[in-house]
Amino acid sequence: MRFKILLFLSVQFCYTYLSIAQTQLSLVENIDHVLLQEKTNKGAQLVDVRTNKEFSRGYIAGAKLINISSDYFVERIDQLDKTKPIILYCAVGVRSTAAIEMIRNLGFPIIYNYIGGIRDWKRNKLSLVKPD
């Protein structure tokens, strides 16, 4: 009898834990440059996760720099508006993919990953902003 009760409680705990964990993770979707422009026009927050040096060579208009390598990366992302989707990009998509795993539990409704990053943006002959 004790075994059955312990088994029941263990199953309930696992089910509850998994349900809570799943509800806290943001949805993630990979997007291209066309959808990036569409989503930002609709109010999605655009975040460049590259280094300061890379950012200084040019970035996508409207992007905010939050360097994935910085000590404050998660804290800065956590300060963004949680009611709006977020789009992450880097040079080619590797760091933005890693960044998503770091922030999926922060409560954004959806996180978009611009696969191809700046390299794809340039390949499509789209303009970059140069900081002052």
Image (cartoon, rainbow, N blue to C red):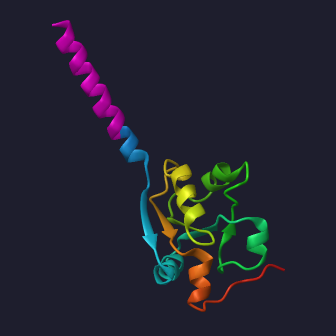
In what quadrant of the picture does the N terminus appear? Answer: top left
Residue 7 part of the magenta-drawn span: yes
| Quadrant of res 64 | bottom right
| Quadrant of res 19 | top left
**Is 74 displayed left or right of 71 in the figure?**
left
Q: Foreground residue, 1 or 97?
A: 97
Q: Which residue is depicted at the point 45% across and 74% down?
A: 31
Q: Foreground residue, 115 or 75?
A: 115
Q: Which residue is depicted at the point 79% across and 69% down?
A: 53
Please, is residue 34 above or below residue 107 in the view? below
Name the spot of residue 109 as percent of width and height, x first: 44, 59
Name the spot of residue 25 as percent of width and height, x first: 43, 49
Please, is residue 32 above or below residue 125 in the view? above
Q: Which residue is depicted at the point 62% across and 69% down?
A: 90
| Quadrant of res 22 | top left
**Is 58 displayed left or right of 125 in the figure?**
right
Numbered disc total? 0
**Is 131 displayed left or right of 19 in the figure?**
right
Q: Magenta residues, as a range?
A: 1-19
Residue 49 part of the magenta-drawn span: no
Name the spot of residue 18 as percent of width and height, x first: 34, 37
Please, is residue 79 above or below residue 47 in the view? above
Of all residues, the one furthest to the right in this rendering is: 132
Name the spot of residue 29 as percent of width and height, x first: 42, 66
Q: Which residue is depicted at the point 22% across and 18% down?
A: 7
Main secondary structure of the magenta stretch: helix
